[in-house]
Amino acid sequence: MERSAAILTRLTKLTDTSLIVHWFTANAGLIKTVAKGARRPKSAFAGKLDLFFSAEINWSPSRTGELHSLREVSPENCRPGIRRNYDSTLLAAYFCRLLELAVEREHPEPELHDLLKRGLDHVEEEGPSTRALRHFEHELAHRLGLAHEKRHAAPALREALGGLPPLREQLFDRLKLGKNFRFPQTDSEA
């Protein structure tokens, strides 16, 4: 069994009852796990798997292939504010996609795990902004040794990674124009 702090970056339906869960872990880098039975109403994973959750996870490594078995999840930070605001959700998704392009699977990158955690926490607390987008790109480019000046981060990442996630242009335009849609709060959140 392996154990690590992790951030949930992507969910994919595997079967009628199971999910493929992508994690960016502090100890093992990007990993994919299968959460068997996670879509069942009485699953042990119920309420524990959603985008951008930080959690302590346990998994059993696969002997063949890259799809490991998720055993336990203990959520530590659910970041509900990110899901209440569409632009926050887009920015958080952009951070995750950019990291997926930049790192090798199952290669530990604790500094980049910390960068993603800080980026998501910032979006949760302060909301989305072009400043946050550019800062994340700069920090990533700097840690990858691609650019040392902020104004060169996006072009350096674009060249090194073979492009940036298509979401960037839409997100940048929305944030620049201030089209910041916030989902209404429910009675339980007020």
Image (cartoon, rainbow, N blue to C red):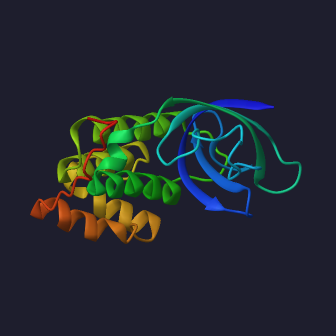
Residue at 63% across / 41% down in the picture?
A: 46
Q: Position of residue 183 (x, y in %)?
A: 27, 53
Q: Nearer the viewer, residue 31 or 183?
A: 183
Quadrant placement of the C terminus: top left
- Can see residue 147? no
Q: Name the side, left or right, on which 58 lies relative to 160.
A: right
> Relative to residue 27, is residue 89 depicted above or below?
below
Residue 80 screen position, x and y as percent:
38, 40
- Judged left or right of residue 32, residue 95 is left
Name the foreground residue: 138 vs 116.
116
Relative side of 32 to 135, left or right: right
Q: Depth check: give the residue in front, 19 or 58.
A: 19
The answer to whether one can see residue 85 in this image is: yes
Q: For the point 42% across and 41% down, which residue is it?
A: 116
**What residue is at 13 percent from the left and 61 percent from the top?**
176
Q: Please state the horizontal and vertical placement of residue 140, each as a whole percent of the image.
A: 38, 47
